[in-house]
Amino acid sequence: MNAPLNTNGLSRRALLQAAGALIVSAAPLGQAVAAPAGKPALHPTELDSWIAIGKDGQITAYFGKIDMGQGVDVAIAQIVGEELDLPAEKIQLVMGDTFLTCNQGGVSGSTGVQSGGIALRNAAAEARRLLMERAAERLGAPVEKLEAWDGVVSVTGVPSKTLTYAQLVGDGYFNTKLEWNGQYGNALVAKGRAKVKSPDKYRVVGKSVARFDVPEKVYGTLSYVTDFKLPGMLHARIVRPPVAGAAPVSVDEASIKSIPGAQVVRKGELVAVLAPKEWDAVRAARQLKVVWSEAKPALPEQWTLYGHIRSAPASHTEKPADVGDVNAAFGVAADAHYSGQALLVEAEYEWPFQAHASMGPACAVADVKPGSATVWTGSQKPHAVAQGGAKLLKREPGAVRAISMVGPGSYGRNDCGDAAMEALLLSSLVGKPVRVQGMRHDGTGWDPKGPASVHYARASISVSGDILVHEFESRGFSRIEVDNNEGDPSDTLAGQLTDFPKTPAFAFGVPEDGYAIPARRNRWETIHGFLPKANPLRGSHLRDPVGPQVHFASESFIDELAYAVDTDPIELRLRHLKAPRDIAVIKAAAKLADWKPGGPGSRRGKRGEILTGRGFAFSRRGATLVAVVSDVEVDPATGRVWCRKFHVAHDCGLVVNPQGLRQCIEGNVVQGTSRALFEEVMFDTKNVTSVDWNSYPILDIRDAPESVEIVLLDHPEIPASGAGEPSIRPIAAAIANAIYDATGARLRRAPFTPERVKEAIAQSKVAPIRA
Amino acid sequence: MAQRTTLKVNGGTKAVEVEAGTPLLYALHDEIGLNAPHFGCGLGQCGACTVHIDGKPVRSCITPTSAAAGKEITTLAGLGTAGKPHPVQKAYVDEQVPQCGYCVSGWIMTAAAFLKETKNPSDEQIREALAGLKCRCGTHLAIIRAIKRAAKDMAQGSVA
């Protein structure tokens, strides 16, 4: 583990990366990176589109998704290595080049392993089957008598009889068809005749394997998309209006005449400056004089945001799928309330707009020529970039090649899609390669946002602790005001500002928790965005799209219900859960944290003037289950909350790479803490005013938890169900519940800033909050 | 007018031609072709552009190139290599710290300077020394583990 790459491999790899391919591997580079002559054309039904074996024995796997630094690539290499009986470090992975990999949909919904791994696992199993067949013939032994490890096939008990994978395929092709379900994206499944390995035979999957990309990142040698250069490339910056919705009326090109080589490019309402040197482009963007149209300020005063969300006309009302007769159940419950046998509990919760605010503003490099177009992008979804790019340039599908390179962080549909379209458009207009990178105010102020929302919950609970009826409603901005990918230019700023009007699309979400309640209604409703195009507050997918806000509300509310009837909040949850895995994950977290059962405030304590408390939350995300205990310390004088400890139990079925999974969970917990305590996009009526790290603060290391303890519930018999997002989901609720335990103050609006915490404490003293 | 400036970078000498006032980041990244430092904010707020000048961490996005002329500039790649890592870099690999990794220059360059001054720091001292640096992926706990490991390695002299 952690072996440095061999020098030869590194330099060849660096060369290939300079040519653009995103290649990761702990092994030296082999052949078959560029498709050589004779290789069957890229297609999901071609085994050769998934697996290649070079003359030198190098195994290459072609992955149609990518990794964003959470180790998905390592897990995929483990899965491929497992089926081919090779250590993961021997697999070279080519990722996210649309001319070299099938469209598996990119990074999306924690599907990297759960969906992305299926086709590769099947393909690797089929490759092994064919290798074994050939070996059996050449070694004169039946397949059952063969064994393989590390690329060498031998006859059991006859060590002299061996053949290597290279000898068996050696730069040839499998020329074998796979069965394909006709789907692209996350749903793509391809399989051959081979049966995949039974999990009880695993020797590669389930072991910790070090990440392939860490050394290059730590020694400063990795080429990020921001480092990619082409000869003759121009640097571009987009000039955005000071008032959202304003269009350029006139541009004074003479205002940047003093800057060498600087030029203005306009198309529709898009204004850009370009220059051979990057700093000159930065200066030109600052210096350019633009007269903007008098746009009527389109945003409300920030303090009216939640009132606006409550009162604005619905853009879409999703029909609820009720369990039981909810209206009748509330009717029956009313009598129980009257007689004191049950309590009616109601609460509302509010969540702000949040920014992706990736570490660096998005960057892309494009080279558009009459007969070809290539874009190097940090997008999570290079296949979508290629599709959107072809539409933007009005070329045939498949005419644009998108090549994925490591970007400055990505947690959903961030600004990378916008940068990719801008680079393609500008390169097509100037006929030269163009590199676009935003400034900080672009990356925070103009990236797509996690949508703001209000959540309303109402339930009746018997005094003995049975939830009789439960109603939950989410109301907020659509999470697909721009889609979760840039496969259509109308979902990007460059598209919206030129020829691609956006057709509105609406989606939100409701809790996923598995509580069995006899009558239950979950519903969601969206409202329109503030601007029909180029909206700086356009809703989109931000890590675990709407999961943190929905479950902040629903899991805070379960706590309120428990305390309303003086019940331990874990006990109340367990009482309403039936699935053994749900129960197991909750019990595992409680045990790990040494949870002491009890009613409201029973876990509170003091450390000097500091109030301490614990909270719990549970959520499902698909088949992945997470339970978390949060320990907080609250300074009542300042309102500062320190989330000192977390105890997390995590069940995502089969665990492929325990070490990688732990680090992924830890990142989710810390990012979730940041969003719960600090993150809120600020705006005035003209525009977003959160434009840098001071106006959009995130968690500082002084606020980082002391520890995040994790227990992984491994189920090798259950397919891996994804871990990139589920553990960010319950964090805000666990923290809010812990603050209540510590202080008696219920936080129903995120983030839990010192001012809000202080105010909530003050109010709880006036009228103690007992839901 | 572009000016010719000679920079001493990672033990070598490089001449760059940049407009007066160009931040050092662009000279290092665009003219000399070093992959790290990175542009994160251009405002000195995040640290992704951090380099050492005469051993002290500075934010290259707000440092004029001219101010660095003649001084010893060290970037992440100059701090250590896979073959000869700085203890903080080695610990970063051992602890598998980075996710996107775009921020690492800030943390590693700041920690390297901090550990030169402070032996066996407490958690509290580490947090104070690194305050203000940004990491969006949430690797903060791994960062603290790595710095403690590096401090220990340095105290034991097990890493040069």
Image (spheres, grey):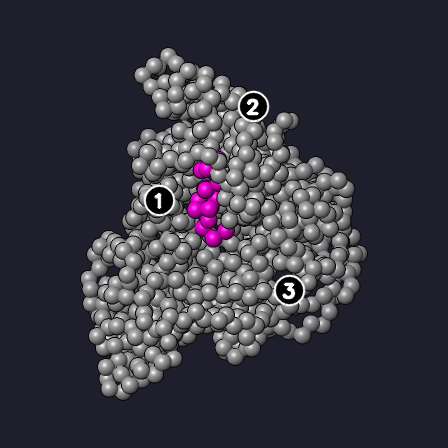
Q: Read off the residue under disc 2.
A: A172
Circle number at residue A654:
1
Residue placed most toward the observer, A317 or A599: A317
Provide residue B137's location: percent of width, then percent of height: 45, 50
First of labels 1, 3 by sequence position: 3
Q: Nearer the viewer, mark 2 or mark 3?
A: 2
User: In the rendered structure, the residue with mark 2 lies on which chain?
Assistant: A
Give the spatial CA distance, label 1 vs label 3: 40 Å
User: In the rendered structure, the residue with mark 1 lies on which chain?
Assistant: A
Could you tell me which quadrant the N terminus of chain A lies in?
top left
Could you tell me which quadrant the C terminus of chain A lies in?
bottom left
Secondary structure beneath label 1: loop
Provide residue A180's location: percent of width, then percent of height: 53, 42
First of labels 1, 2 by sequence position: 2
Tell whether position A105 is magenta. no
Residue in view at x 73 percent, y 61 percent:
A269
Q: Read off the residue under disc 3.
A: A503
User: Exactly how many numbered labels are in the figure?
Assistant: 3
User: In the rendered structure, the residue with mark 3 lies on which chain?
Assistant: A
**Amino acid type at image mark 1:** Leu
Bounds of the magenta segment: A108-123
**Amino acid type at image mark 2:** Gly
Horizontal arrangement in the rendering, residue A392 relative to residue A333 (left or right): right
Secondary structure beneath label 3: loop
